[in-house]
Image (tube, rainbow, N blue to C red):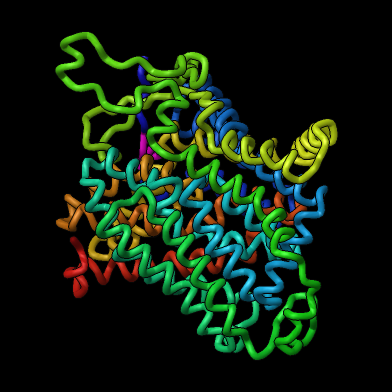
Amino acid sequence: MVWSHVYDPLASPLLSTAVTTLPLVALLGLLAFAGWSAHAAAGAGLATALAVAIGIVGMPTDAALAAALYGAAFGLFPIGWIIVTAMFLYQLSVEAGALEVMKRSVIRLSADHRMQALLIAFSFGAFLEGAAGFGAPVAISAALLTGAGFPALEAACLALIANTAPVAFGALGTPIITLAKVTGLDEFAISQMAGRQLPFFSLIVPAWMVATMTGWQGLLAVWPAVLVCGGSFAVVQWAMANYVGAALVDVVAGLVSLVTLAAFLRWWQPRECWQHERESPSSAPAASAAPADSMPAIAWAWTPWAFLSLAVFVWGLPTVKSTLEGRVPTPVTTAQAAAVVAPRPLLPKSVVAPEFPVPRLDGRVAKVPPATREPLEIERAVYRFNWLSAAGTGILIGSLAAVPWLGIRWRRAWAIWWDSLRRLSLSLVTIALMLALAFVTRYSGTDVTLGLALTRTGWLYPFFAALLGWLGVALTGSDTSSNAMFGSLQRVTAEQLGLNPLLICTANSTGGVMGKMIDAQSIVVSATATGVHRQEGAILRRVFPHSLALAALMGLLVWLQSGPLSWMVP
């Protein structure tokens, strides 16, 4: 028997909304203000979500528990898999001494921590977001910043702030592709609309990140580098999104920004070199004080990360992904189907990407209007164990290639692998609990109840459309998931209010990116990568105001584009 969502279980929109916020309040409140550990706060949030879903909304108990198990499994794979493999490569670099060479090579470009944050957290992180997504940019960028000498807590926060503007195009355009499928809008048109919103924030975010580190005075001292970093990224992001498509926006823009800023720093440096560990700025020549490694040594140290970048990029290509998942890379034509000569996949899908319908959940829950344009939309719950095509597997391949390259014995590499798993065990449990909570709110429909509260804002809705996307990412940890969850609701609301559906639906994705820095999954990833496992609450308190402020700015831009700036809408 199918159970349909109930979006107003208490027959009062105000009371129903208040009750459905309890899991989020429990999670974030206990984490940020009560001093609870991340896994304890996540457990309390999950228990609250189950109580609301079963006791208030009326979701069948077995379906609610199945949703929690489904979310926990998804948290371990593919999310946890990315973290484990990325940290494995990091530990290999530490073991071989390559990380110290990398640190010195970055210092040779500039000893200024502001420049290093721009290079690593923003430019390189954007490339990783475009190639892999799903937590890899935060994990790797935060780890590299820590290795470069940043305080661990600061490195975690900077990696989260930087991982915003690229997210809407992340993982080879997956969020945009998903939004197009859910809403029925043209994928290229969504890409164009996003490309007319996010470039403004690609200029703002690097400046915002530097100002967070050193204040506005520190930002003014390095504004040329900030402009080069953000400006080169914004221009390429705009051009790729409007004339090429969503798939390679972040990959190309991230690489261009990285190369452009590195070249700029060859002839320009800040007058004063600012570093976290110093109480007062030192003179700029401090960059030359770092010991000079030979070019072969620098190439040796960076090559494992080149292996990683190449692997995750290749793994994300549609043709490669289809092949690794046991699907036919090219579409079958009608003539082929008629002749019964359809090409067969190179690998058996049942082996490389088996799918398991979740018992007691798959096909048992249904969305209803206004959350969907259909009278009844059955929710599927199929766990796909695509172990070969997962981004984490691509990272593992790059890591294994690095083992002989770094001169590490395989027995020692095996010991490092198990040591990494041991260190990450509690973090993996936390991520599993976080995703379990997210899946319970999704399948119980309580997330839609929260979203409907924002749809009652009338002429201000364009502003709140971006905040709805922000809320979706904060709840699910993924812009893709937020688009799948709220995309249809955004279109229905836009049509009811006489607004442009393209603008409003795109705002769900572009506003959502600002929620990436406060979702519990990303916070745990950043804390794990920097070794500050018990300071997730401090990270959340630090980044929350930045997240909300940037989301409000995006909402303001969307509201202006619904009126005086409507000429910007394709």
Q: Quadrant of residue 203?
A: bottom left
Magenta run includes residue 8: yes
Tell whether position 314 is magenta.
no
User: How far across and down, in percent of the image, does residue 323 sit?
Assistant: 42, 26
Where 432 falls versus 155 (above or below)? above
Magenta span: helix, strand or loop, mainly? loop
Residue 212 or residue 139, whichever sits in front: 139
Q: Residue at left 54%, top 74%?
A: 263
Which one is in front, 137 or 336? Answer: 336
Q: Is residue 197 visible?
A: yes
Q: Looking at the figure, which quarter contains the N terminus?
A: top left
Q: Residue furthest top?
A: 340
> Eyeballing the image, is 190 above or below 119?
above
User: Looking at the image, can residue 357 be seen?
Assistant: no
The residue drawn where x is 54% and y is 68% is: 546
- The answer to which quarter of the image holds residue 378 is top left
Q: Is residue 206 above or below residue 439?
A: below
Q: Is residue 330 left or right of residue 287?
A: left
What's the magenta region?
A: 6-11
Which quadrant of the structure image shows residue 517? bottom right
- Expressed as whole percent of the image width and height from the top left, the position of residue 516 reads 51, 54
Q: Residue at x 24, y 11 (%)?
A: 341
**Residue 236: percent from left, percent from top:** 37, 65
Please provide percent x and percent y for residue 132: 51, 45
**27 or 273: which is nearer to us?**
273
Q: Is residue 306 left or right of residue 423?
A: left
